[in-house]
Amino acid sequence: MHFDNSAFQRVFHYEDNRGGRIKRGIIQRIGKSWKNTRNLLFYKFYDSRKTFEKNANHKPSGIDANHWKWFLEYWLKDDTKEKCKKNVINRSKQRYTHTGGSKTMARKRHEEEAIAHIESQDASSKELSQNDSFAQVLGKEHPERVRGLGFRPCPTQCFRNIPQ
């Protein structure tokens, strides 16, 4: 999907796009919200016991009647129902959810090898510090976070008595 960058920046008020990451993040959030809203609308306003006409008349406020009819027709198509069933089956087969992020496996492998190399050279780099093997390979951490510990702890809680 293509958006005019200058108009997009004016609407969402940001100056530095950081290599396209900000715009991509905004578009992803919009897409996810739109998908969730469509799903919510269908399951909140559609009643399988009613006829198509009654469901078409029972539309959410603020939505054009023709758009609502098109939306219902789409959800009630055999192809759409088949896709939904297939997706449910495929999701049930997944043993683990993807948590790898956007890095390629090759890039992760390279980082892991670099960390292992640093730790084999210097045993003290295994200890938690702001200059441990992770920091040497992955770079300085976000100012208010500690890598690998999530959003809760801040650096002063973890590195209070550790020399930097």
Image (cartoon, helix red, strand yellow):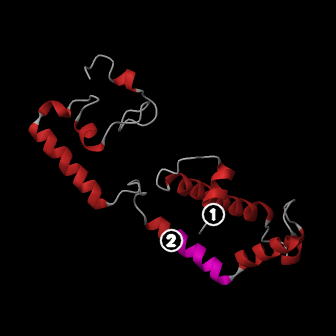
Magenta part, dominant SS: helix
In which quarter of the view is residue 118 placed?
top left
Image quarter (top left, top right, bottom left or bottom right) of the N terminus = bottom right
- Residue lying furthest top: 161
Q: Where is residue 104 in the image (x, y as percent from the top left)?
A: 33, 60
Q: Does the magenta stretch include residue 80?
A: yes
Three-letter amino acid code at the position of disc 1:
Asp
Helix, strand or loop at label 1? It is: loop
Q: Classify residue 104 as left or right of residue 44.
A: left
Per the rendered image, the range of residues in magenta is: 78-89
Residue at the (26%, 39%) spot, across then down: 134
Helix, strand or loop at label 2? It is: helix
Q: How many marks?
A: 2
In which quarter of the view is residue 159 placed?
top left
Which one is in front, 124 or 10? 10
* Residue behind mark 2: 89
Three-letter amino acid code at the position of disc 2:
Ile
Which one is in front, 118 or 65? 118
Which one is in front, 144 or 38? 144
Q: Where is residue 148 in the image (x, y as percent from the top left)?
A: 35, 38
Residue at the (56%, 55%) spot, across then down: 23
Counting residues from the N terminus, which is met first, the one under dot 1 or under dot 2?
1
Q: Where is residue 39 in the image (x, y as percent from the top left)?
A: 68, 63
* Residue behind mark 1: 4
